[in-house]
């Protein structure tokens, strides 16, 4: 018993220390609540109301994108706005359902067996998302977001936009499709059933589009989505009384918002793990980019891992209150900022307004025609397609173009979680391919003592000496290419000494050390010599600890001097002349004697 107690105490201390080292806090924004008075209260209340007026219809739309009842989006908006600020490090990021996470839910749940009740598995799905985010926050993995290229995100969002659009087209046309897991799968089934189009639904959708576009272009200051829903719901009610056959979304009353304890099923957990991890990853990328952008504009600093913790606990809370995945919303966060919010209180006000709206008006949602909401969702999807970012991604580099095409194609043909994993993998592999090709440039020097790049080996100042400048990474991925490149340079039969300038060579590791050792022994077998010049302290440290300095010979290693960059090459040339028995020739490389000679080792 005592051993068990000791073990428990040790585990408690380890857990406490681990949490302490994470630097995560409860309510890190409490310092911003100081001197909170009437003026700030009024500003935050107005900002919260502005955000709530956008949040309420967006929540309905995003729930529809995810294939869930409307109340899921509304409940999530309220819960996220109330819980998120307690753990967030950003004053302005508004948490709640977003289009990107909603379409990921739609795609991710398609892996479940046909007939599975999505509503029943959503709490378990959210628990998984929350768990991944909380563990990631304590392990401080949010900093890895910087390795996700914007090209991958742009391609993913473009593919998600396509999936949003084709999933709502059947609703506008009044069609009922079976299960389809990809963009082309949904599109194919839609085309096959065009003959069964409900023209009453199509007409209502067309009018909705005209009303929305009119409001967007002529009355930009009013909430166009909310007004369009109100106007078209009234028109739909009138048409229904005239005998039109229209489909409506499902409403909810005050009794629909209850606390639910998720029923954990390990089989379902394994089926949803991949999609949940993808959603957690996407939430982190989305929220981090929004938070950093607003923090820069406000002169704030945010902790990405603290923000990740906020996401994790908010998603966990949503699992118990009938919600859907939570992320940072760009449109609502910018609206919160532009509404002169002073801090976390505006999010609380927004949550209270949305919660009140859900309880008071939830039962009226069943007066919104599905075709009307589908058209508005399609407009959301179209707005996600950023032509400027796509143009930049496609035109910038070959690697970006390949990454964009692969990610977009996989998003259209397969599930979105697979697409984002594949996109990240391709972008990293292409980067490693680029980084593993160091640049080797041969130099000589002119009469004035200045180094210059040569294109023809016949123009060397010393035909038997080659000065090779190495630029780039020399980690394991580049080691073999680097070795082969130097071997190629040494194929000149007149060449006897190669001077490697490692001033701009980085990240040597065990593989590159072995490659260099093999190169040194190869050159010696050919009666030739290798000299290193311009090396930085990091390079010397690797040479010393690995023992490569002994293989090369300390007399053939010359440290670089930041104040006098060319002196190490000058000394290396003198050493080359010693090896060739030609010490009379004058070495002319410009350097400033007043700054001292570069040390050897």
Image (spheres, rainbow, N blue to C red):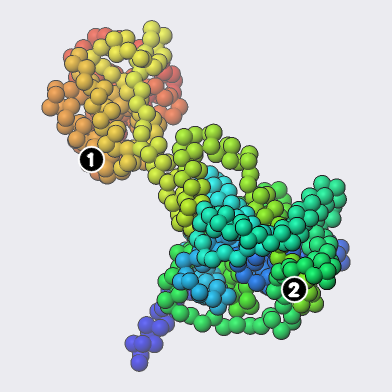
Q: Number of labelled discs?
A: 2
Query: How would you rate the neighbour count of disc 1 (Cα within 10 Å): few for under 14, some for 14-19, many for 20 or more?
Result: some
Residue drawn where x is 69% and y is 62% of the image: 198
Quadrant occupied by the N terminus: bottom left
Task: State yes or no: discs 1 and 2 in contact (Cβ < 8 Å).
Answer: no
Q: In the orientation shown, which residue stands out farthest toward the bottom?
A: 1
Instruction: State the image quarter where residue 533 is shown.
Output: top left
Return the residue at label 1: 514
Residue 156 is situated, as x and y percent measured from the top left of the image, at: 54, 51
Quadrant occupied by the C terminus: top left
Residue 122 is situated, as x and y percent measured from the top left of the image, at: 55, 73
Residue drawn where x is 18% and y is 16% of the image: 493
Residue 195 is situated, as x and y percent measured from the top left of the image, at: 62, 58
Residue drawn where x is 44% and y is 70% of the image: 271
Q: In front here: 146 or 68?
A: 68
Q: Is residue 470 visible?
A: yes
Secondary structure under tag 2 reads helix
Residue drawn where x is 46% and y is 79% of the image: 265
Q: Is residue 578 visible?
A: no
Measured along the vertical axis of the image, is residue 525 above or below residue 86?
Answer: above
Measured along the vertical axis of the image, is residue 434 above or below residue 422?
Answer: above
In the image: residue 220, left or right of residue 121: right
Q: In front here: 439 or 598?
A: 439
Query: How would you rate the neighbour count of disc 2 (Cα within 10 Å): few for under 14, some for 14-19, many for 20 or more?
Result: some
Residue 438 is situated, as x and y percent measured from the top left of the image, at: 36, 32
Secondary structure under tag 1 reads helix
Give the spatial CA distance, label 1 vs label 2: 71 Å
Return the residue at label 2: 366
Instruction: State the image quarter where residue 431 is shown.
Output: top left
């Amino acid at each position: 018993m005592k051993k068990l107690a000791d073990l428990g105490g040790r585990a408690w201390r380890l857990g406490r220390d681990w949490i302490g080292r994470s630097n995560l806090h409860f309510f890190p924004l409490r310092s911003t609540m100081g001197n909170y008075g009437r003026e700030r209260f009024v500003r935050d209340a107005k900002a919260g109301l502005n955000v709530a007026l956008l949040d309420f219809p967006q929540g309905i739309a995003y729930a529809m994108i995810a294939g869930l009842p409307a109340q899921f989006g509304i409940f999530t908006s309220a819960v996220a706005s109330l819980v998120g600020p307690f753990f967030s490090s950003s004053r302005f990021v508004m948490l709640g359902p977003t289009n990107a996470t909603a379409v990921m839910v739609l795609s991710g749940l398609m892996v479940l067996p046909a007939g599975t009740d999505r509503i029943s598995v959503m709490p378990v799905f959210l628990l998984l998302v929350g768990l991944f985010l909380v563990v990631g926050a304590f392990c401080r993995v949010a900093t890895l977001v910087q390795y996700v290229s914007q090209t991958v995100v742009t391609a993913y969002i473009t593919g998600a936009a396509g999936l949003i659009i084709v999933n709502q087209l059947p609703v506008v046309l009044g069609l009922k499709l079976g299960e389809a897991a990809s963009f082309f799968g949904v599109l194919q089934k839609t085309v096959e059933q065009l003959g069964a189009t409900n023209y009453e639904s199509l007409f209502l959708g067309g009018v909705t589009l005209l009303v929305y576009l009119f409001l967007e272009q002529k009355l930009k200051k009013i909430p166009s989505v909310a007004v369009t829903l109100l106007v078209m719901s009234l028109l739909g009610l009138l048409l229904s009384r005239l005998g039109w056959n229209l489909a409506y979304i499902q409403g909810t009353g005050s009794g629909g918002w209850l606390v639910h304890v998720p029923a954990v099923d390990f089989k379902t957990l394994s089926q949803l793990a991949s999609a949940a991890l993808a959603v957690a990853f996407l939430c982190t990328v989305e929220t981090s980019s929004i938070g950093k952008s607003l923090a820069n504009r406000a002169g704030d600093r945010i902790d990405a891992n603290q923000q990740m913790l906020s996401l994790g606990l908010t998603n966990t809370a949503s699992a118990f209150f009938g919600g859907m995945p939570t992320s940072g919303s760009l449109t609502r966060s910018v609206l919160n900022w532009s509404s002169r919010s002073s801090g976390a209180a505006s999010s609380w006000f927004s949550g209270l307004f949305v919660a009140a709206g859900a309880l008071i008006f939830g039962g009226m949602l069943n007066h919104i025609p599905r075709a009307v909401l589908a058209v508005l969702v399609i407009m959301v999807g179209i707005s996600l397609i950023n032509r400027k970012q796509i143009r930049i991604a496609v035109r910038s580099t070959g690697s970006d173009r390949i990454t964009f095409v692969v990610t977009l194609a996989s998003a259209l043909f397969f599930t979105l979680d697979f697409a984002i994993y594949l996109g990240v993998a391709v972008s990293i592999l292409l980067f490693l391919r680029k980084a593993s090709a160091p640049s080797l440039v041969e130099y000589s020097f002119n009469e004035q003592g200045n180094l210059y790049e040569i294109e023809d080996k016949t123009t060397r100042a010393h035909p038997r000496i080659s000065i090779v400048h190495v630029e780039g990474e020399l980690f394991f991925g580049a080691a073999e290419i680097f070795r082969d490149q130097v071997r190629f340079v040494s194929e000149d039969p007149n060449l006897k000494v190669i001077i490697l300038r490692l001033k701009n060579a980085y990240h040597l590791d065990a593989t590159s050390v072995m490659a260099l050792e093999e190169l040194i022994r190869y050159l010696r077998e050919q009666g030739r010599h290798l000299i290193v010049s311009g090396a930085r302290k990091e390079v010397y440290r690797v040479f010393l600890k690995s023992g490569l300095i002994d293989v090369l010979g300390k007399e053939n290693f010359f440290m670089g001097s930041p104040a006098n960059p060319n002196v190490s090459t000058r000394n290396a040339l003198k050493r080359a002349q010693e090896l060739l028995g030609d010490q009379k020739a004058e070495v002319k490389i410009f350097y400033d004697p007043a700054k001292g000679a570069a040390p050897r080792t």
